[in-house]
Amino acid sequence: MAPRLSRFGPAAVARRPAARFFVTLTRSVPGLASAWWALLAVRSLVPAALAIATGLLVGRVESGGDLTAPLVGFAVAFVLSQVGPPLHQVVGALAGYRFSSVLNDRLMAATLGPDGIGHLERGDLTNDLTTARDFDLGWTAPPMFLNMDFIAQGLVLLLGGIVSAIVLVGFAWWAPVLLLAAWGATHWLLRESGVWRDRNTDEVKTARRHTSYAYDLATEPAAAKEVRLFGLSPWLLERFTAHRLRLHDLQYDATRLRERSLAGALVIVLAANTLLFWLLAQRGYDGRLGLQAVVTYAGAAFGASSIAFGGLSWALDGAAAPVLAILALEPEMARSGALAAGGAAPARSGRSPEIRFRDVTFTYPTGSRPVLEGFDLTIPAGVSLAIVGQNGAGKTTIAKLLCRLYDPDSGSIEIDGTDLRDLDLAAWRSEVAAVFQDFVRYELSLADNVSPLGGDRAVVESALARAGALGLAELDAPMAKGYPGGVELSGGQWQRVALARAIAKVDAGADVVLLDEPTAMLDVRGESEIFRRVLDATSQTTTILVSHRFSTVRQAQLICVVEHGRALELGSHEELMALGGRYRTMYDLQASRFVEVDEHGEEVVHDVL
């Protein structure tokens, strides 16, 4: 019996989606929620009040008494029945708007709060993240401000029916029990309780995510070229339609009436109401009930019927879904994105630091094997180091660990002999200027793209000039065509802007420069020229470059070959070529791609390496 009782105890009720939704709503917008609950209570009393007022009015007419009091009572109940719904709708809409804002704020805090990024790279959180982010787009339910009205309507009917049934206690103690059981049975027989479970399964969430993704591909400019070039428009429309229809089917299956139970529900309801009205008529006919009582109880019995149509409606599961998603995401994101408790040691040393990876092992939170395992590497202060290796060797992971977006599972990263975890995190990150392969293209002015937090325009222009990006646009021009005077840059031009961003940070005092495939969209000569510019601009810093192009790599003072999560070779270009190991093999393989045969059958080597 214990497990069964636990399903209906206070703790079990508190865990249900409806309870968690209402608790979160009330805590998030207490003033508007209180007004919403108060109006809900008033509206729930109106049907019973109308039944009582009607009975009193009929009784006074029958007895020839004063009609003032019953008419006033009836008028008040009638006015409340007319004014209550629109007023409740307005308050509900305001509460819904405000609640949506609070939920979005909480999601932003959950995603931006952790110092690391592990929580944003967990695929198992994607469904909940999509639900929490897109809940007001109408994919699975109306927006929150509309949902509040649907929820109110369902609860008013349910509570109004219960209050009306309670009025029948004056007729017989068992009458409310009879009607509550009969009309309440419709909820169980028609399986409305299955709505919660069936409308929020992993299958539903996946269909919702696929629908949203197809919609984004069709409506965002970034994919427009390929969609048209490869003739993907019909496929994309079909994919969107298929997933959207699948989502509709899943929702319909979760909320449709169970026809097999409908006949049983009708039998129970008809039997209970036939018994009650037959007894009312009999007692009224033989004089045991006066006309006033018959009218009052008949009206109350009629009002009790709304129990069948009220309750925790289908709208509530749509409104609760993002709440449950955010409640689930907050602790998981806080845990996955958390870094070890940092120290307060200042990072700024006023000079380029020596960086040492000491026996570092790291596995991603959802990974099955280490990306780095026993990784050892020392980068002397003020030296430029290039990291090369095959895809998946761990090059980008090294960059993430150095930026302290993750902490290693074991081992340490030392900055001038101090464990990176002992440094003040914000101070350390202010010392690092980085350009990642997937750098951000801000829809801001060119100046703000170079210096997002604001900066001297002369510094911005200098950084653009050294990155070869001066003259791409006016400094105040928006970097997107969707704005008046907006400018659209090519991929290579954007990479120059991103490099200017790093150079500007070096001018602001950064001592470490990290470049993770920063010029992949440039041609070989362009990349070599840009990296030469960057080396000149960052000559006083410790510079780390991740690249596949040896025309760039060979310019670094040191080169590290990473393979299977370990540092395999380390040395200058000349030293590694002389070694004849893995670096020499990769270099010769890439160099062979730039050898041509002329019309005389002679080999011509292009000077790109």
Image (tube, rainbow, N blue to C red):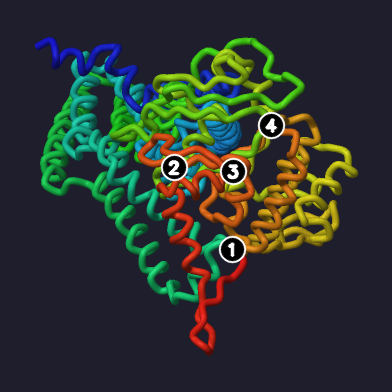
Residue type for callout 2: Thr
Which image quadrant is residue 524 in? bottom right
Q: Amino acid at mark 3?
A: Leu
Inspect this view and state whether residue 96 appears: yes
Query: Any mark on residue 382, and which?
Result: 4
Labelled disc at residue 545: 3
Labels 3 and 1: the sequence-earlier one: 1
Q: Which mark is residue 430?
A: none
- Along the viewing direction, whichever of 327 and 426 lies nearer the viewer: 426
Callout 2–callout 1 Cβ contact below 8 Å: no
Total number of numbered discs in the rendering: 4
Q: Earlier in the sequence, mark 2 or mark 1?
A: 2
Mark 4: give few (<14), some (14-19) or many (20+) Cα within 10 Å. some
Query: Real-space Cα distance between discs 4 and 3?
Result: 13 Å
Q: Check the image and name the residue furthest to the front.
A: 578
**Nearer the N terminus, badge 4 or badge 1?**
1
Whether tag 3 and tag 2 are in contact, CB under 8 A, the answer is no
- In the rendered image, which quarter contains the N terminus? top left
Viewer-side label of 4, 2 = 4
Closer mark to the observer between disc 4 and disc 1 = 4
Q: Position of residue 499 (x, y in %)?
A: 70, 48
Residue that label 1 marks: 221
Q: Which residue is mark 2?
A: 130
Q: Position of residue 440 (x, y in %)?
A: 63, 47
Residue 150 visible in the current orientation: no
Task: Classify mark 1: helix, strand or loop.
Answer: helix
Measure how far apart labels 3 and 1 are at the Cα level: 31 Å
Q: Name the side, left or right, on which 577 lies relative to 128.
A: right
Q: Is disc 3 in contact with disc 1, using a CB cutoff of under 8 Å?
A: no
Q: Counting residues from the N terminus, which is met first, the one under dot 4 or under dot 3?
A: 4
